[in-house]
Image (spheres, rainbow, N blue to C red):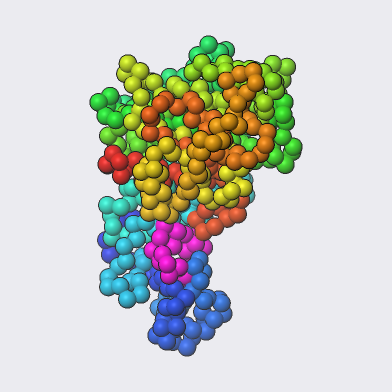
Amino acid sequence: MSDLNAVIQPDRGQKAIAIHLVTRAGLDPLLRALGEGQRAALAAQKFEGAPGEVAIVPDGTGWFALGGVDARDPLGCWCLARLAEVLPGGTYRVAAHGSQAGVPRLAPALVGWVAAHYRFDRYRTDGANPEPRVLLTTEARAIGSALAEAGAITLVRDLVNTPAEDMGPAQLETEARALAKSFGAKSHGAEIHVVGGDALERDYPMIHAVGRAASRHHAPRLIELEWGDLRNPRVAVVGKGVCFDSGGLDIKPGSGMALMKKDMGGAAHALALARLIMEHGLPVRLHLLIPAVENAISGNAMRPGDILRSRQGLSVEVTNTDAEGRLVLGDALTRASTAGPEGAAPDLMIDFATLTGAARVALGPDLPAVFTRRDDTAAALVAAGLDRDDPVWRLPLHDGYREYLKSDVADLVNSHANGFAGASVGALFLDRFVGEGIDWVHYDTYAWRPVSKPGRPKGGEALGLRAAWGLLLARYGA
């Protein structure tokens, strides 16, 4: 869909097709109010009011639509998504819901309506986009924020869905530069700085070590963007940008490599969150950092048993070259911890990474694992996720597992052998590179949807992004 901005518009009394939302429990009263022919039409479509079901009902002069919704959350973010996917092109408005008087409040559902129009068609040649379904809303003030959040979701999906040959470190830099250009002309505008190739070796040695095997075609780099008034609280947003992960010399099997174009999903989330921050003019000093690499194999690839030095000064024994994301993040988190004026730490640091399979085993694909140092930050993040139908689940930074990172020959290992608590141990590794006392959130997200749901197609996905945005809005205001 080329212009998602057109699919929600202010309701000024334009002609529109009515959408009626109904639960299973509310279906019988509705049927009693309909004519025999209308009931027959619903029976033919096997409409039972289940969430996500859609039906079209003739009304003599035209037709109206029915959408099944969940009684527990009838007006949630995704309640209109299936309607937006399958209704014929046209203009719609939602009629009164159940016993409510007037038009229901639909602000949360606007995001789902827009997101449901998403198509990844960059490589397709088999036809034009379908005609859009336009939703009218009386909540005109909610349109801007809904479009911004849906646009951020779209950005993540597009970046993750793009194959690695067209979304390598250089292309991530291009995306960051485009973002900086969009917000560079305003007061305290965005500025970008990139260190790449062999220039990384001195100050960002772990980023260099992971990415050097791909230097000839996909040179590694650290991308930094800063925006906002220096007097505002500093917020660091870090995203793992492993644009393709072969596993290195500890090479993955073919099945394990099949989705590794998505291993830069953390970077995609970080770019999208940065865009939301700048688009809304959030009163913070944003510091975006993306270590962008390809974990490839060549004669100069890092090897199991190598000992890497880090920007922070800690030495790391490489026990598994497929645990590379935490290495590149380690240098970036160290940089973020002391990058403020005179080495000041950020008020809040959030990193996004497709870090461990263990998090997916524990929580499945829908729930990003989050780790925080502070209970109040975790509670605020979980609440923000529930408020936006973008749930997250906290896992522990358990001190007892720090012993799994001990090395006989270095300060720590990058991967432990016993297989226990993999997500927590990965987070504890990162914790060593975050400055003491910093309020830090680590996301271990999948960035991928293996099965389609209404408004959420199979493929790249923003998981936990809007929860993080809600946390920032609650803390720093609009």
Choose between 416 and 22: the one closer to the eye.
416
Looking at the picture, how far across and down is residue 207, in whole percent?
Answer: 56, 21
Residue 298 % position (x, y): 72, 20
Residue at the right extreme, as displayed: 253
Q: Is residue 371 left or right of residue 282?
A: right
The quadrant holding residue 412 is top right
Up/down of 48 relative to 329, above or below: below
Q: Is residue 76 magenta?
A: yes
Of 121 and 258, which appears nearest the observer? 258
Q: Is residue 156 above or below residue 21?
A: above
Quick check: can you spot residue 121? Answer: no
Residue 287 in the image: above or below residue 205:
below
Q: Quadrant of residue 258?
A: top right
Query: What x and y, as percent, mark residue 105?
Result: 31, 62
Q: Is residue 282 left or right of residue 78?
A: left
Is residue 142 in the magenta section?
no
The answer to which of 9 and 219 lies nearer the viewer is: 219
Residue at 38% x, 63% y is 75
Horizontal side of residue 272 vs 265, given as left or right: left
Q: Position of residue 426 (x, y in %)?
A: 56, 34
Residue interval drawn in magenta? 64-88
Residue 238 versus residue 5 in the image, above or below: above
Q: Is residue 397 left or right of residue 6?
A: right
